[in-house]
Image: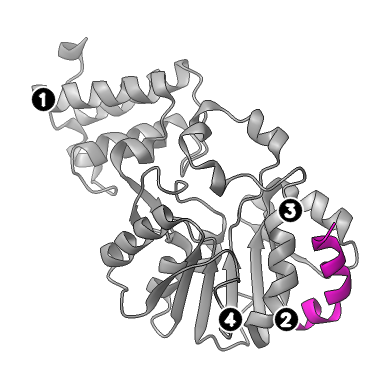
């Protein structure tokens, strides 16, 4: 079989066919077998992700073929996410170091970052921003990369994740404007206030986690699960965020499929659910004034 596979295009096609035939799940940066195979092949060959199609017919060496075939087998047999196999992932058009210390970078919030958070920040000045539950640091680092005037804090409870976030800060060369803080949500942020708080916290229910495909078992459970309804962290964030937002400040949180449980629990809260290119994806925007106005019901819900 190795002799029949010769070029970059051959291996991308072969990888995509193997992944599809194996019934793999695509939920870590890519949503299809072809894109995953392309990422794996180009990363392994140390080639740019936007390689010109003209190089598709370039032939591989025997060692390169062996390395790729071994990674294809690991992806199929172990169900290991491609980002963990290659050590790299793309988020908001930026490359990040990715390994099992944190979830693979992925979130529709990337689209908001690339769009300058319009229209939500169109009439607001941002000097300080917070990426809460930062994991690999991808959201906060991307915010800093696209907004040179912002000072950004990255917060997580996991020391391992924060070590990875520090590596990504250096990798993206934003160390002068990005700070890492170990904290259980806002517990270690006494006195800190921000114009923008963005969070992609754990929001998977225990039942959902039990039913998740094998790929997700490679990621830290700490970064995924949030109780029986997926709202353990989102409710704490809603309750505590007003004390860490400046006047006119904005909170943006991803809750995924737990959106329905959140709306049912807090039906009068004026959530703005963001529409992305592919539709609504469980991300809400709310300002500090609304959080303060509804503080009582939020606190009661958080203590349920």
Q: Residues within 10 Å of mark 2 (few under 14, many from 20)?
A: many
* Cα–Cα span, label 3 and label 2: 20 Å
How many tags in the picture?
A: 4
Is the image coloured rainbow, by chain, by secondary structure, or in one colour?
one colour
Sequence-earlier tag: 3 or 2 = 3
Measuring 45% from the left and 76% from the top, which residue is drawn there?
152
Contact between marks 1 and 4 (CB within 8 A): the answer is no
Residue wearing tag 4:
190
Residue wearing tag 3:
231
Measuring from the top left, give residue 177's x and y in whole percent.
37, 80
Q: Quadrant of the C terminus?
A: bottom right
* Cα–Cα span, label 4 and label 2: 17 Å
**Stretch in magenta:** 288-304
Nearest to viewer (mark 1 / mark 4): 4
Tell me the SS state at disc 4.
loop
Measuring from the top left, give residue 108's x and y in whole percent.
57, 55
Residue wearing tag 2:
288
Tell me the SS state at disc 2.
helix
Residue 1 is tagged as none
Residue wearing tag 1:
63
Nearest to viewer (mark 4 / mark 2): 4
């Amino acid at each position: 079989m190795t002799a029949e596979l010769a070029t970059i295009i051959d291996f991308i096609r072969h990888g995509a066919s193997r992944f599809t035939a194996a019934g793999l799940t695509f939920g870590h940066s890519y949503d299809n077998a072809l894109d995953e195979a392309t990422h794996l092949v180009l990363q392994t060959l140390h080639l740019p992700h936007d390689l010109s199609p003209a190089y598709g017919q370039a032939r591989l060496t025997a060692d390169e073929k062996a390395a790729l075939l071994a990674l294809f087998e690991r992806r199929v047999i172990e169900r290991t996410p491609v980002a963990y196999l290659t050590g790299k992932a793309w988020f908001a058009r930026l490359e990040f170091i990715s390994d099992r210390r944190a979830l693979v970078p992925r979130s529709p919030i990337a689209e908001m970052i690339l769009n300058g958070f319009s229209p939500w920040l169109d009439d607001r000045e941002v000097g300080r921003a917070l990426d809460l539950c930062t994991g690999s640091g991808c959201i906060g680092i991307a915010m800093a990369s696209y907004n040179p005037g912002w000072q950004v804090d990255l917060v997580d409870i996991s020391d391992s994740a924060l070590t990875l976030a520090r590596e990504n800060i250096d990798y993206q060369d934003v160390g002068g404007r990005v700070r890492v803080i170990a904290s259980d949500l806002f517990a270690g942020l006494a006195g800190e206030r921000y114009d923008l708080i963005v969070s992609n916290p754990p929001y998977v229910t225990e039942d959902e986690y039990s039913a998740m495909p094998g790929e997700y078992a490679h990621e830290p459970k700490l970064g995924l699960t949030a109780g029986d309804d997926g709202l353990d962290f989102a409710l704490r964030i809603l309750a505590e965020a007003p004390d860490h937002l400046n006047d006119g400040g904005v909170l943006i949180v991803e809750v995924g499929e737990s959106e329905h449980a959140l709306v049912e629990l807090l039906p009068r809260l004026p959530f703005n659910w963001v529409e992305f290119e592919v539709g609504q994806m469980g991300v809400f925007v709310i300002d500090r004034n609304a959080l303060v106005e509804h503080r009582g019901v939020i606190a009661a819900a958080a203590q349920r």
